[in-house]
Structure formats: structure tokens, C-alpha cells
């Protein structure tokens, strides 16, 4: 294919039979790639659990955690983690936030009081979370409900609470990641 140019700028370039890659003229704000969504169907078993994120005061519910992996191609791009997580609170301490993380140094916390901001369960949590200033490389992103104190949380992903809700086997949650060209 060679190079694809627009107004004198190389938008795409291809060497041999390799896939085309974004050139220096690839416009900012455009999607470079999107991962295949990780889709979690049906419900998992409700369980009380907590896992500490490194040495931070973030304790997440590992059994309902969702993951997706991306190989970021460009240092000057950013990653957008998109997710919808359906969780059902069973008992014990509740989750009062959400954390999207690679590790304890690459994370974004979201204040969403999973228990207190809703009168009914289950609840669906949908967000688009941007990660900037991350070098090119391969990353596994995790999405989890969490709290700031060391107490068990008892939840079920895609769990039904009321008999008139659709049955749990028909429910799903998902996460996917997009790499978007920066400036």
C-alpha cells in the first residue's frame, strides 16, 4: 500500500505486508483501535470479598471485577476504557466507589456510591474513563467496585433481585478499550 497522504501529511503508512499504522498526520481525536469487548454473561456466585490495591486505601470486589487488555501503539495517544457493570448488592458492607486500574500506579477512582445512590438493586454502572500520559505498551485494565475501608463487600455480577426482572442468564456486563490519537 505504501503511504496514504492527505494535504501533504502522511495519515497511514504501511511497510510490506504489515498492517497500516497511523502516520504523523493522523488527526487528533480519531480512534486508532478498539479492543474486542470482554463480555460477562450470566451471573456469578454472590460472595463477600475484598482485595487491596497495592498499598492504597482502595479495597475492590475481585469476584465481580472485569478485565480487558490492549497493546497501546503510540506514546502521544490516550486510552478510553468503556464499561457497563451490572451488580447486585447482597449484604454486609457496600461498595461506595469504582476503580479502573492497571496497578497501584495507573488507576482512576470514581466516586459513585453504589449502595446509597440507588433505592433498588441490581444497578448498572456505565462510564468512559480516559487514561493519559501512559507510554506505548501492553496493559491489562481492570474495572471493579470498591470502598475505602477494609471491609468485605457482598455482590453478584449480573444477579437478579426481583422476580419480574429478566433472568440472570440473560444479563451481561462488558468492558472494552479504545486508543485515540492525541495532539
Image: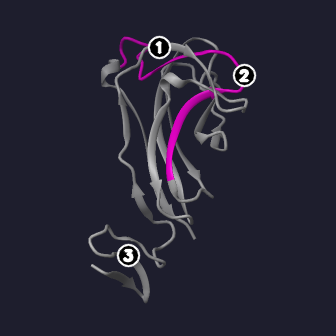
Residue at x 57%, y 51% (from the top left corner) = 130
Looking at the image, residue 19 sits to the left or right of residue 102; the answer is left
Residue 63 placed where, x, y %? 49, 22
Mark found first going from the N terminus, 2 or 3: 3
The crowding category of the residue bearing disc 3, from other C-alpha atoms within 10 Å (few below 14, some 14 to 19, many at least 20), is some
Image height of 8 relative to 14, above or below: below
For the residue labelled by badge 3, is the local secondary structure a helix, a strand or a loop?
A: strand
Q: How is the image coloured?
A: one colour
Residue in the image at 48% along x and 21% along y: 122
Q: How many marks?
A: 3
Q: Label 3, on which residue?
A: 12
| Residue under numbered circle 1 | 46
- Residue 109 pos. (x, y %): 65, 39
Of the numbered discs 3 and 1, the one sitting upstream in the chain is: 3
**In this view of the protein, which residue sits in the foreground, 43 or 66?**
66
Residue that label 2 marks: 149
Magenta run includes residue 156: yes
Residue 81 visible in the displayed image = yes
* Quarter occupied by residue 132: bottom right
Segment tinted magenta in the rendering:
138-165
Q: Quadrant of the C terminus?
A: bottom right
Q: Residues within 10 Å of mark 2 (few under 14, many from 20)?
A: some
Which element is circle 2 on? loop
Helix, strand or loop under label 1: loop
Q: CA distance from mark 2 to mark 1?
A: 20 Å
Amino acid at each position: 500500500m505504501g503511504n496514504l497522504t492527505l494535504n501533504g501529511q502522511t495519515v497511514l503508512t504501511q511497510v510490506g505486508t504489515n498492517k497500516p499504522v497511523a502516520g504523523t498526520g493522523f488527526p487528533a481525536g480519531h480512534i486508532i483501535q478498539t479492543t474486542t469487548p470482554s463480555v460477562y454473561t450470566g451471573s456469578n456466585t454472590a460472595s463477600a470479598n475484598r482485595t487491596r490495591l497495592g498499598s492504597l486505601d482502595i479495597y475492590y470486589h475481585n469476584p465481580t471485577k472485569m478485565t480487558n487488555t490492549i497493546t497501546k501503539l503510540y506514546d502521544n495517544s490516550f486510552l478510553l476504557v468503556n464499561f457497563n457493570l451490572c451488580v447486585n448488592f447482597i449484604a454486609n458492607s457496600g461498595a461506595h466507589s469504582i476503580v479502573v486500574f492497571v496497578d497501584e500506579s495507573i488507576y482512576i477512582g470514581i466516586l459513585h456510591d453504589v449502595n446509597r445512590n440507588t433505592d433498588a438493586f441490581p444497578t448498572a454502572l456505565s462510564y468512559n474513563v480516559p487514561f493519559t500520559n501512559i507510554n506505548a505498551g501492553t496493559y491489562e485494565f481492570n474495572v471493579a467496585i470498591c470502598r475505602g475501608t477494609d471491609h468485605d463487600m457482598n455482590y453478584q455480577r449480573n444477579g437478579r433481585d426481583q422476580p419480574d426482572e429478566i433472568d440472570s442468564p440473560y444479563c451481561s456486563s462488558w468492558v472494552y478499550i479504545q486508543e485515540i490519537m492525541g495532539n
